[in-house]
Structures are given as C-alpha cells and as structure tokens.
Image (tube, grey):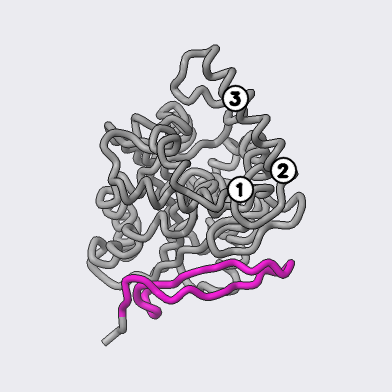
C-alpha cells in the first residue's frame, strides 16, 4: 500500500545560484501526477495547506503535492539585490520541475504565483508541451498592476498609491529578515485589503504572520516587478493545456476584470467566480478550489 501523508516535512532546495528555498512535499510519493502550488506576493506556502491536504480525496486517487516558499518569503532565503522578480520566480519553478519532479504536473498559482506560471510559459514553453497537464490561475492578473484602484474612488486610490510608493521606497532600503516583529497591528488593514465577506479569524491572523515574515527589500522589489508584469502574450502557451481561472468578486487587488481578461485570451479555459470572496480565494473558498484542481488531475488520468 502506498504511504500517504497530508503534509510532509519541510526540506531545503538549493537553486543554481545558491539560494535556499523551503519546500514541502505531501501526498503519495509514487503518484502518477504532481500538483505544484505557488503562493502569492508577501504570503507563504501555507496559503495552500487546505487545498493540498484535501486534493487526494477530491481527486479520488493518489496525488503528490509540492508547496514551497518563494525567495524572500516564509522559510526561504532572501533574493539578492535585483533578484526579487517574477522572472526569477519562474526560473526557480523551472529548476524545481527539472530537478525534483518527474512525470506530469498540474500547476496552481495564486496571485503572483499565477504570474509566475505565466512567466514560466514565456520562458519555458517546452514544459507546457511535454509535462504540464493542467493549470489553475487563482486571483491573478496578466498585467495592468502599476496603480490598482483597490475598489476606491479615483482620488482616494491615487492617494493610496502615492502612499504605497513611499512605503515601497523605504522598504527597498530596509535590512533585516522580517517586515515587522509584530503581526497583530497588520491584521485590520489586511482584513480589508485581502479578504471578502466574513473571513475566518484564523485566516486573517495567518495572513498577517506571512506578510510580517516577508523580507522588506524583497517585498519592494517584487512590487516593482508586479508593476512591470505584462504577460498577456504568454497566455497563448497555456492554450495547450486545460486551464481554470478562479476569481473572487470582492477582490480588491486583482478584481474580476483581470480574470475576465485572462479568460478572453484563453477561450477554452473555464472561468469561475465566487461572490463574496476576496483576494485570498485559496483560504476563503478552499473546498471549491480543491475540487477545481482535482478536476484537472482526474482529467489527465482519464486522458
């Protein structure tokens, strides 16, 4: 009988440039498909805990899972100066697929994780020809993130973006390994920014811990990369594989219009929207997200 665990023991993966990433395998080691989960900006691999734990049951069979922390996030080392970019995240993901995973893969990306998958398609289209069996793009965007309106009136949004640029400049000059030694003060603002209606208190607490644990200078670097992100052309590569696009209708960071633009570029993709859900769809609608990713896994099995 195949040994199966919901969550594995964290381990270290050292990239070609010597950066150590914290990663965590789960599920069945000899499963025919591996689901790889990529988290969002300022968050951590635990964003995907519920989905990864529930995937084997939802898929009705063995699945191997991999969650990992991007550079400068969670338990991974910080990116070097100039290395906190979506392009570098895609390079790291490609290394993981080449060196640590065999066989077909289903990719799931939340927010900047989805953008990382788009960058991977841009940089390594061969993987989507040969190994990628499905893609889930969750609360993400293919571009137009330079000055988000956050669901606010124009003048208020402009003021918020000016304030954000000031904070970003200060973070870029900061040292240390954590944004803040205390996460609790971040909770009210993150509750408003990241979540929709009636989030679980424990989810807000966890999100604040993840954001507080992000490397300050890397946070600023990634925000610059988000502003420059424009990969609508790369979506053409995803037409080769089954794709689902998931969005929350109460998302302030990547509102529904971003999901619609992706879906228009991928006419064969499924677009699903969740009323009342904010940006943290993997937490707010974890059962539904699990089921959609499970459908990608089972579709590959049938094929």
Where does label 2 land, which residue? 172
Badge 2 vs badge 1, beta-carbon distance below 8 Å: no
> In the rendered structure, does residue 20 fall within the stretch colored magenta?
yes
Quick one: SS at disc 2? helix
Q: Is residue 192 above or below residue 18?
A: above
Query: x and y percent of residue 60 in the render?
Result: 23, 66
Quick one: SS at disc 3? helix
The structure residue drawn at horizontal position 31% and vertical position 78%, both measured from the top left corner, is 4
Q: Distance between the residues labelled 2 and 1?
A: 23 Å
**Going from the N terminus, do you reach mark 3 or mark 1 first?**
1
Task: Mark yes or no: residue 69 visible.
Answer: yes
Q: In this view, does 19 lie above or below 115?
A: below
The boundaries of the magenta stretch are 4-32
Residue 254 appears left or right of 293: right
> Where's the N terminus, which quadrant?
bottom left
Q: Hey, which quadrant is residue 133 in on the image?
A: bottom left
The mark lying in front, picked from 3 and 1, is: 3
Where does label 1 land, which residue? 119
Where does label 3 land, which residue? 161
Q: How far apart are marks 3 and 1 (CA)?
A: 25 Å
Residue 169 appears left or right of 110: right
**Going from the N terminus, do you reach mark 3 or mark 2 first?**
3
């Amino acid at each position: 009988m195949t040994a199966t665990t919901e969550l594995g023991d964290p381990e270290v993966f050292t990239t070609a440039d010597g950066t150590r990433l914290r990663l965590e395998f789960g599920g069945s080691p000899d499963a025919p498909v591996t689901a790889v989960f990529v988290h969002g900006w300022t968050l951590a691999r635990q964003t995907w805990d519920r989905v990864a734990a529930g995937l084997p049951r939802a898929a009705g069979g063995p699945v191997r899972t991999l969650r990992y922390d991007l550079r400068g996030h969670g338990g991974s080392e910080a990116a070097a100066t100039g290395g906190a970019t979506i392009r570098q995240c895609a390079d790291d993901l490609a290394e993981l697929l080449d060196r640590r995973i065999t066989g077909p893969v289903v990719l799931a990306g939340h927010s900047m994780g989805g953008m990382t998958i788009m960058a991977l398609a841009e940089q390594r289209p061969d993987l989507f020809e040969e190994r990628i069996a499905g893609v889930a793009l969750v609360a993400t965007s293919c571009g137009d993130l330079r000055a988000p309106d956050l669901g606010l009136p124009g003048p208020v949004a402009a003021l918020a973006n000016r304030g954000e640029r000031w904070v970003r400049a200060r973070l870029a000059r900061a040292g240390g390994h954590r944004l803040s030694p205390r996460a609790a003060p971040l909770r009210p603002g993150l509750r408003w920014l990241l979540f929709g209606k009636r989030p679980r208190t424990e989810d807000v607490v966890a999100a604040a811990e993840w954001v507080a644990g992000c490397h300050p200078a890397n946070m600023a670097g990634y925000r610059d990369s988000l502003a420059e992100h424009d990969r609508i052309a790369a979506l053409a590569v995803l037409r080769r594989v089954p794709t689902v696009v998931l969005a929350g209708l109460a998302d302030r960071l990547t509102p529904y219009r971003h999901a619609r633009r992706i879906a228009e570029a991928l006419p064969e993709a499924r677009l699903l929207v969740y009323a009342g859900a904010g940006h943290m769809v993997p937490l707010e609608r974890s059962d539904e997200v699990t089921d959609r990713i499970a459908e990608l896994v089972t579709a590959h099995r049938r094929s």
